Amino acid sequence: MVGMADPTSRVWSVGDLCHAVADALNARFNPVAVRGEISGFSRAASGHCYFSLKDTSGQLRCAMFKRAASLLDFSARDGDLVEIRGRLGVYEPRGDLQLIVESMRQAGAGALFEEFLKRKARLEAEGLFDAQRKRVLPLAPRAIGVVTSLGAAALRDVVTALQRRLPHVPVLLAPAAVQGAGAPAQLVKALESLYRLVTDASPPEGERARADRAPVAPDVILLVRGGGSMEDLWAFNDEALARAIVRSPVPVVCGVGHETDFTIADFVADLRAPTPTAAAELVAPSRELWLGALELMRGRMQDAVDRRIDRELQRLDNATARLGRPSSLAATQRVALLACARRLRLATRSLMGQHERELLQLAETLPVTHQRAIDRMEQRLERSALRLGLLDPALVLQRGYAWITDEHQHAVTSAVQTHPGQRLRATVAHGSIDLRVAQQE
């Protein structure tokens, strides 16, 4: 037909066609949110990340530039199920469909975190986190209970640390799964098995415990596992487990995950350790500490004996000076004085022997009262220093977070405080970055 254009009459260049397709995608889909599994994840030297997002029916190439990658709050790896927000486009040099990732989070993490916050607030309102109910760790535990998985790396780390620092103290293992639907019930069962040991070791009311008859029972319990995602650590947010920890007859130290991981078990335990190894070190003072305390007490006892001898010899010198010139009475008194001196020397030697025996006895029954107080204060200082270090804002920036301010140096904490085109500044661990708001969501 004359006058009608042939739809195939236009011949596109490859670049123009790719550009047109990119424009069509942008107008039809962007911005887009998609959920899938990471495959082939890699991080280039530039800091950009490349991977594919797939499910059972499709696969999509993705690129996440350094700025977006620096905002991730987890370590992405193959097999992770994630939710991505970004913009579809065409990588024109190859003509490939590509998703430019602007943000990424683990699928389901938002719902889990909301449940975590609700559960935490409810238990905190009941007083389960109160500092007044937290107990001080034993200075010299006679036995240590450990609750974790038999195949966990955390078990090897804890046993290695305890063998290095307190090789003579028995370790009582109560194995349990640390991940999965059945893990909370197994963890509660393992804790209660250790509680029964403590109960069985306690003598009846009105009777004194006998060391030769009492069964071995833990003075402190370590609840540990290695790091992982929120889903991996979810068993330690279980309410029944939290209440079981509160019922413990002995202090419980929780060392779950890495330094930045927090679970409800951490809040209800008597003490939270940043790692399983740190949990073992908190309950196991080093042998060098005890040997130093023994040497300190030996020196104090020796000083006390020397001062007593000097004081008695001085009394002898004063008595001798008061005798005056020799006479028959003075000679008699001198004989008596020499006899007293001999008895004093014998008594002094006897006293020294007694002190030596007492020193040996003290060496066998360490810790002593004074050193116990010193060590307790040092232990509290170490824990306080550790907790203070965790609150250092610089650590937060080093984990990839940024402090956002507007042109008036006011903190920006919500998207409603911004408008398109507004200039912002992001302060990171090393320096600052000037930003411009492209779109408000």
Image: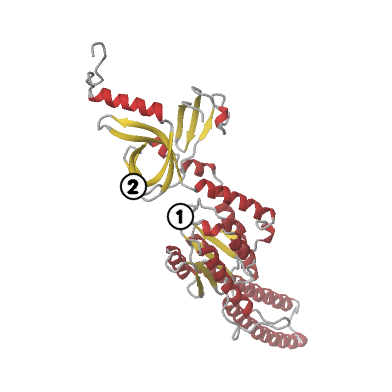
Is residue 48 visible from the viewing direction of this image?
no
Query: What label does residue 39 carry, if any?
Result: 2
Q: Which one is in front in this view, the residue at disc 1 or the one at disc 2? A: 2
**Rendered view: 352 above or below 250:** below
Query: What label does residue 429 carry, if any?
Result: none
Determine whether the residue tagged by mark 1 lies in a helix, strand or loop: loop
Is residue 356 visible from the viewing direction of this image?
yes
Residue 183, horizontal then vertical, whole percent? 51, 64
The residue lying furthest to the top in this view is: 3
Res. 46 image quadrant: top left
Q: Residue sitting at 28 percent across and 29 percent down?
A: 92
Determine whether the residue tagged by mark 2 lies in a helix, strand or loop: strand
Residue 221, horizontal then vertical, whole percent? 56, 68
Res. 328 image quadrant: bottom right
Amino acid on which disc 1 is placed: Gly
Residue 215, horizontal then vertical, whole percent? 58, 81
Res. 344 image quadrant: bottom right
Q: Which residue is mark 1?
A: 228
Give left or right: position of 21 versus 274.
left
Give left or right: position of 64 versus 94.
right
Residue 291, horizontal then vertical, whole percent? 52, 70
**Rendered view: 424 above or below 317:** above
Amino acid on which disc 2 is placed: Ser
Give left or right: position of 424 versus 316.
left
Total marks drawn? 2
Residue 351 or residue 153, whichever sits in front: 153
Q: Residue sitting at 63 percent across and 63 percent down?
A: 243
Q: Residue sitting at 44 percent across and 67 percent down?
A: 160
